[in-house]
Image (cartoon, rainbow, N blue to C red):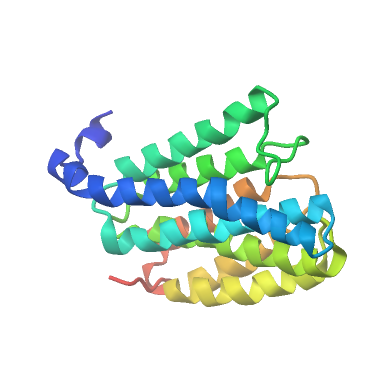
Amino acid sequence: MQAVLQVPIESVYADLPVFVVLAVWNLFVLFVISKKVYEFSLKKGRSTSSSMYFSRKTIHFLAGGLTALLLPFFAREPILPALMALGLAFATYVPHKLNRRMYWFQDPENIYDVDFTLSWGLIIFLTWYIDKSFWLGVIPVLFMAFGDGITGIIRNLKYNKRTKAWEGTAGMLMLCIIIGAQMGIAGIIAGILCSFVERIENIDDNITVPAVSLFILVGAYYYFPSSTVSFY
């Protein structure tokens, strides 16, 4: 509670207009754009599961990834980003709970979409107290949003279903190395390891990918600072 109170209330008020816009954008992606992607995929002859998967990865890119990428440039504090993520987690969890899922992206067999928003919010919130530029939290989130997003698209294009395959891992590996390079050797190592962690079956990579990469980056930040290069 004391850590939360360290955030100047003026910063929260200053960030409010930005996060109103971002919240509206995220809802637009969730309810409009991703649904259009699902419908377009079906019309192109994709299976229902394949179309749903394209829809989910659209949310990864345009909601989770884009929003995270904007934080270092427009956000001053972590409370509103965390509250927005918590609100989106609630908005995605309730349809699961009521068995009224948003069919164009919500899988009845898991609640990974909820885990995505919770991981996003928790990482962004906690890492701000270590690195107020946001980058320490943004990089693991980008691994989850963009890295896992591209691997899903590659696999889906080839196999027309949700599956694990090395082609997707290769795509994620290349993208995560590029993303991770922005934080030096430690970032590259984190990008490589989380790409292979994502390959593990029957476990939610929305938790494992950001957790593994964050562990590496925080360790490097404190114990091997020369191995990290930041944007600030």
Where residue 85 appears, as percent x and y from the top left, is 44, 41
Q: Horizontal placement of 202 versus 11: left or right?
A: right
Residue 169 found in image quarter: bottom right
Quarter of the figure that contains the N terminus: top left
Quarter of the figure that contains the C terminus: bottom left
Where residue 62 appears, as percent x and y from the top left, is 51, 60
Which residue appears at 63% of the width and 50% of the height?
Answer: 35
The answer to whether one can see residue 171 in this image is yes
The answer to whether 67 is drawn above or below residue 117 in the figure is: below
Which residue appears at 67% of the width and 36% of the height?
Answer: 111
Residue furthest front as drawn: 43
Residue 40 found in image quarter: bottom right
Where residue 108 appears, as percent x and y from the top left, is 76, 35
Q: Horizontal placement of 136 versus 7: left or right?
A: right
Give the total number of marks visible in the rendering: 0
- Name the residue nearer the viewer: 161 or 192: 161
Which residue appears at 23% of the width and 53% of the height?
Answer: 76
Q: Horizontal placement of 90 versus 3: left or right?
A: right
- Name the residue nearer the viewer: 49 or 45: 45
The answer to whether 134 is drawn above or below residue 82 in the figure is: below
Where residue 49 appears, as percent x and y from the top left, is 81, 50
- Name the residue nearer the viewer: 198 or 46: 46
The answer to whether 80 is drawn above or below residue 148 in the figure is: above
Residue 177 found in image quarter: bottom right
Which residue appears at 79% of the width and 72% of the height?
Answer: 167
The answer to whether one can see residue 129 in this image is no
Residue furthest left as drawn: 10
